[in-house]
Image: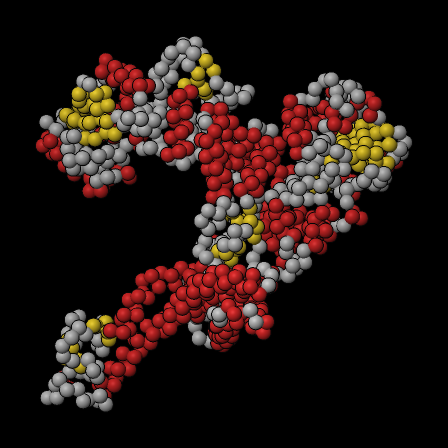
Amino acid sequence: MASSQKRISKELAEVTTNPPAGITVSLVDEANVHNWNIVMDGPEGSPYAGGKFKLLLVLPTDYPFKPPKINFKTRIWHPNVTFDEHGSMCVGILKPEAWKPSSKIMSVLTATQQLLIEPVPDDALEANAAEKFKNNRAEFNKEAKEWTKKYAK
Amino acid sequence: MSPTAALRSITLRRFQPGRTFHSSSRAFIKVGDKLPNLDLVESSPGNKVNLSEEIKSGKSLLIGVPAAFSPGCSNSHIPGYLKHKSLKNAGQVFVIAVNDPFVTKAWGESLDPSGNSGIRFLGDPTAKFTKALDLAFDGTAIFGGPRSKRYALEIEDGKVKALHVEPDNTGIAVSTAEKVLGSSDKPATRSSKRLASAAAKEGPPTPLTTSTPMDSEDEFMSGMSSEEDDVLQESDNDDGSADDFGFDEPEPELGFSQKDAMPKKKKTFDINFKVYHPEDIQAQQDDLIDEVNMILDIRKEDAAILLRHFRWNKERLIEDYMDRPKKVLEDAGLGPSATGPPKLEVIPGFMCDICCEDESGLQSFAMKCGHRYCINCYKHYLGQKIKEEGEAARIQCPADGCKRIMDAKSLDLLVTTDLQQRYHELLTRTYVEDKEQLKWCPAPDCENAIECGIKKKDLDRVVPTVACDCKHRFCFGCILADHQPAPCELVKRWLKKCADDSETANWISANTKECPKCNSTIEKNGGCNHMTCRKCKHEFCWMCMGLWSEHGTSWYNCNRFEEKSGSEARDAQAKSRVSLERYLHYYNRYANHEQSAKLDKDIYNKTEKKMIQLQSASGMSWIEVQYLNSASQALQTCRQTLKWTYAFAFYLARNNLTEMFEDNQKDLEMAVEALSEMFEKPVTELAEPKLKVEIMDKTSYCNKRRVILLADTADNLANGVWSWSINF
């Protein structure tokens, strides 16, 4: 749809010219505005600090009426991200019932960043990580840091 | 029970006799009647006013209102009179409200501070006067007690010359100044005009047109007889069902005659229900919306959204709205709003925030929340919600985080007709699904819904079988096909047990034995009689079930059948088999009737064809062969009942009641089998008059036996006297 092209270009321009702190955005393929590479710095103060996480953002053909899909390409040990090659993430704004056509990619990116700072263990995808986050924070931080060191350098 | 509900039920009890028993002798006051000789009060309790004395001669006008200071009365109804240019020709004008005189005085002063109009405001604190006119209705839910319908009485020389009574008690249509005094060049306020035109659509409001359409509940109740009536009606009214405001009280005479005309005797196991066709369901929603629209003085679209938000609980909606209107509106997605109908606009310099289009002339739309998007994006968004997600009642504004709900009027403006149609279908769906006492008929392609007051908690005492107009009979409790006499919980367990067990149980019964020691089920898959249980390693003889070690040297040749250990083991074996055999006994009979019902139906279908041939050959009329149809139907329903009696009996503990039940079951079963046999006779025999009479007799006998069985079972269930072999 032509209209979605226009909207996407506009959002891309916004994010690339004025990116949120710690996030860089580029197209996977210059000819296709639907697939975005994201590189996100692990936020300071979180066990992910110092790491660089790659994510893939895919905009469906009927974006913005359907929410974008976002996955971690870098392995991350986090209660709300599957600890596997998919790196699927559970973030509120992307749930179909919460997504509105006027929601912006910028808010998806900041929500993702926020999720790294503040995991939501009650909506966990990785029960093990969520359990440790809730009951043994020191252990959680230690383990998350180790994985960050291993994968996100 | 909330305090209001308690109060309401008390008032209802007080109102009941008047509602049920008045005949024509005590209907509304009529043209030609004199006013009752009763006192009203003006300004203070000591200042009594007797209208039958005061207006003996000349013209006067009595205006009755539901409540002083209520929005409808203060904003449009009475001001309409105050402003009307013909008011001075109406003679003496009195406004009467069921309020104390201090309230009516203060109200009069607020509406007509100068007192120039000459209108006098009278109080009828006990509603004595209003009740004598029979113009009171039960307004407990909103006003805390009986109130006056909205009316206008034209009096001449002490007698009623004309009366204008609002058919829905509180509306503002037929009793407006315009209607009563003639149209004025000064228009009445916006809302009264709108309402008047709404009423005009339904039919010309003429004086004395008080016969409102029967409200659904009363129509439904009128089909019942006996003392259960009032009890049920009260309890129905107590639980906040749709019509419990008493706002749509039917015209008494009509209610009376309908009750008389339908003296249908009810069976104890029959429950009250009503079938609604799609148009009834729509009309019910419209009525509720209209009512809320009038009481709360809000737009119809908003009333609809509020009602859906409150799951069609009108009472709770009104109570909450009266308490905290802002919060209710916000929660329902109707935040602060401007007025005016929804419309598409072209705004210069507008850019759609969704598609980022900004071409000039682009049409855009915004709901009351002000979030504006272009028509194309709106179309796409709504289409996706309605078509793909099946959403209707809860479509939100496309703006991020905005909870404003899309209303029907705006939607109709934005999408194509087929989407509109689908949207309204979905809305109707939510209406039925939101209401506990409404359920869709589960028959394929049936669009009807059934209303029934049976609640989940009643299901251990009653089996609520209902019959849709499409002929499908089903249980209102669990939506499964009719399963009288067995209660829902029993049915659920039985079906689960059958699904788990029956096939396997049959095979187990035929091919296995249990280990005498640990009761594990063992299949002998060949070889010798020396069995070793895989589980407990017990060694025994398959033939005599005795200990293998006691077989001594006579291995492979079991001749020890009379030995002690063997007979004990066989006893134990027998006991464990009993439960299985018992289950199979009931299951086989249950399954048999299910199967037979199908076969009976097949036979009927074939016979029906033959009967058509026979009709032309023997000259029998269609009517004359209908006895076969009745017989077939009796077989179907009786077998359905019989089938479930076996599931029922399976769970019964043995006692006298159970024996009586089994006797009833046996009688019905024998009758059904006899009828079934006659029914299978070839067509040539069926045409014989003798057999025809026998079939007719047997059919009615079967039906009778079924009723006896069901009535007996239902009574015991209602009284909680069955004892079960398991805990429900």
**Relative vertical location of residue B615 with respect to residue B662 in this rendering, above or below:** above
Quadrant in the picture for residue B372: top left
For residue A113, side relative to residue B175 (left or right): left
Query: B93 or B194, which lies in front?
Result: B194
Q: Residue at x 14, y 25 (%)?
A: A52
- Image coordinates of residue B326 in percent, x first then y, are 51, 28
For residue B350, side relative to residue B341 (left or right): left
Quadrant in the picture for residue B141: top right
For residue B597, side relative to residue B320 (left or right): left
Q: Looking at the image, can residue B610 be seen?
A: yes
Q: Residue at x 40, y 70 (%)?
A: B589
Residue sticking out furthest to the front? B617
Query: B309 or B269, which lies in front?
Result: B269
- Image coordinates of residue B82 in percent, x first then y, are 75, 22
- Image coordinates of residue B598 in percent, x first then y, are 43, 63
Q: How many marks?
A: 0
Q: Looking at the image, can residue A45 be seen?
A: no
Q: How is colour applied across the structure in the image?
A: secondary structure
Quadrant in the picture for residue B728: bottom left
For residue B503, side relative to residue B102 (left or right): left
Q: Residue at x 67, y 22 (%)?
A: B189
- Image coordinates of residue B211 in percent, x first then y, are 71, 41
Q: Residue at x 46, y 47 (%)?
A: B445
